[in-house]
Amino acid sequence: MQNNPRPLDETRAEITAIDQQIQQLFLRRMACAEQVAAYKLKTGDAILKPDREQYLLETLGAQAPDGLRQEYVSMLKSVMRVSRKHQYETILSCEPARLELTLAPRCDQPARVVYQGLPASYQAQAAAAMFPDAKEVSHVPTFEDVFRAVSEGRADAGVVPVENSTVGTIHEACDLLVQYDLHISHSHVDHIYNCLCACPGATLQSVRTAYSIKPALGQCQNFLKEHGLEQQEAANTAVAAQMVAASGDLTLAAVCSEQAAALYGLTVLAHNINDDKTNQTRFIAVSRGLSARSDDNRISLVFTLPHKNGSLAAALSVCADHEINLTEIHSRPLPETPWNYRFYIDLEGSLCDPAVRAMIYQLSEELSTVRILGSYRISDSTETR
């Protein structure tokens, strides 16, 4: 580093001149990429050639000075990735069938809807918000029962919670999406106002134990600990309310909605006991077919990666290259393959968007596996009590 650096304006002027030269070289490289795409379009050859890219990275990287080798290799990787992006877009625009998507008509008024829990649960409220004209709405004991009913054709849509703003992702629902090969068709966000409810005659001083589904208990930890309440899990908030009502025990309480308290004859001892007063839950409706509309605003994908350095960063960089906003990511262990994972991501956009399709095409060609879980629109409820 120079002891007496020249004026900053002079250095910046030189940087601009260098960047202009780089731009011209970049345009020449992209023109070559288009020639490569034309050749591979004709021959059906794969765009990604890992061995060639690795050879170039090693050979050219070895020629860079030690102090800048990593930076130079990082730049090369970026150039190679955006070159592939350009090739994928070129090929897909010529042959859209390269990305095979079997889309079914979306049913906004399913005849049969199923949810987990009991009437007056938050799932029941979400099902009513998404499908107010459903002819038959039924409930089942477990999340898996919801997925099984849809998969076997006994229901046209199933409603489950998938994410909460306080406790995060509800992993069971995500895993069941993969297990049962179903798709997300609708999504709805509800503001959740948990209450502590007990049998008539109970007081905050008399109750000793609070029952509810695990996420609901997790949303109210400060209140429950402050009042010294033992926490016990139930299958659902409404199930907890029904169980407490049936017991007649003044030492038991349920964390549930006001609707559940009213339906099962409980008294509300405390309103809105969430730690986070902006507490919200996102629900999804699952169906048997993948559908898409131009006004969808969310896409869900699940993928697996080759187990090597930088593979996740490279996959996420593809989303950034296509200027598609990533809204959520989480991982889940792959069964019977210790320390390997599948990754779930949510993106803004629609499958009808060419940029989204090009991104998915690139990911499907370069990752171990890619599956589209759904293209859908998230609706929002301003207030649900």
Image (spheres, rainbow, N blue to C red):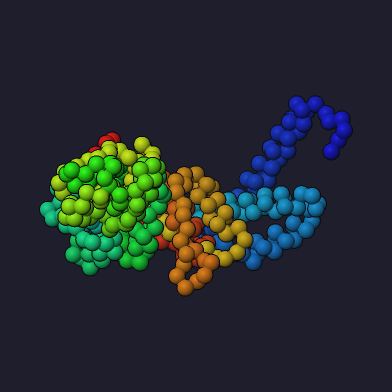
**Residue located 78% across and 58% down the image:** 62
**Residue located 80% across and 53% down the image:** 66
**Residue located 79% across and 49% down the image:** 67
Residue furthest left in the image: 135
Horizontal arrangement in the rendering, residue 337 relative to residue 209 (left or right): right
**Residue 292 makes an appearance in the image:** no
Residue 323 location (% of width, % of height): 50, 44
Asked if 46 appears above or below 300 in the picture, the reply is below
Asked if 98 appears above or below 11 in the picture, the reply is below
Residue furthest front in the image: 206
Residue 56 location (% of width, % of height): 70, 60
Count of residue discs? 0
Q: Quadrant of residue 276?
A: top left
Judge by depth and name the residue closer to the eye, 184 or 318: 184
Horizontal arrangement in the rendering, residue 77 relative to residue 182 (left or right): right
Quarter occupied by the N terminus: top right
Judge by depth and name the residue closer to the eye, 232 or 383: 232
**Residue 7 makes an appearance in the image:** yes
Horizontal arrangement in the rendering, residue 35 relative to residue 350 (left or right): right
Residue 129 location (% of width, % of height): 22, 44
Judge by depth and name the residue closer to the eye, 355 or 130: 130
Horizontal arrangement in the rendering, residue 178 relative to residue 124 (left or right): right
Q: Quadrant of residue 39?
A: bottom right
Judge by depth and name the residue closer to the eye, 328 or 169: 169
**Residue located 57% across and 66% down the image:** 307
Q: Quadrant of residue 149?
A: bottom left
Residue 254 location (% of width, % of height): 26, 49
Quarter occupied by the C terminus: top left
Residue furthest right in the image: 3
